[in-house]
């Protein structure tokens, strides 16, 4: 009786402890993000991947979900379903969501670009043989999310990647300006008027 009780309780205790730890880590990161986004001055934080405990992808998601006014996303690859759903959710909440991606994304099947457009999100892409290789997003014009991470499933769960989240306006400003430059440069009128925007 005692033996079988031990047999069951040890893994159970381990499971409970790791769940508590995970919840604590999640809560701590969430609190940090809230503090970061509400800080008036410059604040930054760094996330690393692969994200075994999925804490960092939650953190990235939380930051994007905080968008109230605008979400300017400029990423080479955008096929991560969770991140796409966040963009679609933001659009439905009335956030102005704009996406710039690489033209290679147009030929992927099922197409992430088509999914975003079908849901009413404006997507523009480059029209040259160079890569649109950025991987950044700006939340509400004041919080930059930048790093090596492709917004794909594989990149989040396997690769060594980094993301810097910053509200330092010296850094955020140039990224916002560059977004506007590329948004105009990749206007479909410049290459293919029949391409939806
Ligand atoms: C943005 O991320 C890229 C890729 O990791 C890095 O090379 C670049 O220095 C980052 N820029 C800033 C301002 O953090
Ligand atoms: C990430 O993007 C690069 C191009 O920048 C590509 O070569 C690589 O295969 C992508 N990795 C993943 C995991 O999507
Ligand atoms: C890859 C691609 O879309 N290429 C187009 C770029 O724009 C010119 C017109 O300016 C088109 O002819 C190309 O097909």
Image: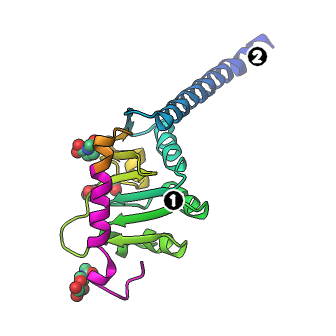
Magenta segment boundaries in residue numbering: 174-197
Q: Residue at x 78, y 11 (%)?
A: 2
Q: Are the residues tagged 2 and 1 within 8 Å (C-beta)?
A: no
The answer to whether residue 177 is left or right of residue 8 is left
Q: Report the front residue among 2 and 159.
A: 159
Q: Is mark 1 within 8 Å of ligand 2?
A: no
Up the image or down, 124 lies above or below 146; here it is: below
Q: Pick the quarter of the image with the N terminus.
A: top right
Residue that extends furthest to the top in the rendered view of this protein: 2
Disc 2 on helix, strand or loop? helix
Where is residue 193? Give x, y as percent: 34, 87
Packing grade of label 1 (10 A; few <14, some 14-19, many >=20) is many
Quarter where residue 177 is shown: bottom left
Q: CA distance from mark 2 to mark 1?
A: 48 Å
Using the rendered view, name the quadrant where residue 8 is placed: top right
- Magenta-colored stretch includes residue 191: yes
């Amino acid at each position: 009786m005692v033996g079988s009780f031990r047999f069951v309780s040890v893994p159970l205790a381990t499971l409970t402890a790791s769940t508590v730890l995970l919840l604590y880590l999640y809560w701590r990161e969430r609190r940090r993000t809230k503090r970061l986004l509400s800080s008036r001055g410059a604040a930054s934080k760094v996330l690393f991947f692969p994200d075994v405990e999925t804490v960092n992808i939650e953190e990235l998601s939380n930051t994007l979900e905080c968008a109230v006014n605008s979400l300017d996303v400029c990423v080479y690859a955008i096929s991560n379903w969770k991140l796409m759903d966040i963009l679609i959710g933001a659009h439905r909440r009335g956030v102005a969501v704009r996406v710039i991606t690489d033209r290679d994304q147009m030929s992927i099947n099922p197409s992430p670009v088509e999914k975003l457009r079908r849901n009413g999100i404006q997507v523009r892409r480059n029209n040259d043989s160079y890569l649109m290789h950025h991987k950044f997003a700006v939340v509400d014009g004041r919080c930059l999310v930048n790093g090596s991470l492709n917004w794909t499933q594989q990149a989040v769960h396997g690769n060594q990647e980094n993301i810097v989240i910053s509200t330092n306006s010296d850094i955020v400003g140039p990224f916002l300006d560059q977004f506007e430059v590329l948004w105009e440069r990749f206007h479909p009128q410049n290459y293919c008027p029949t391409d939806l925007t």
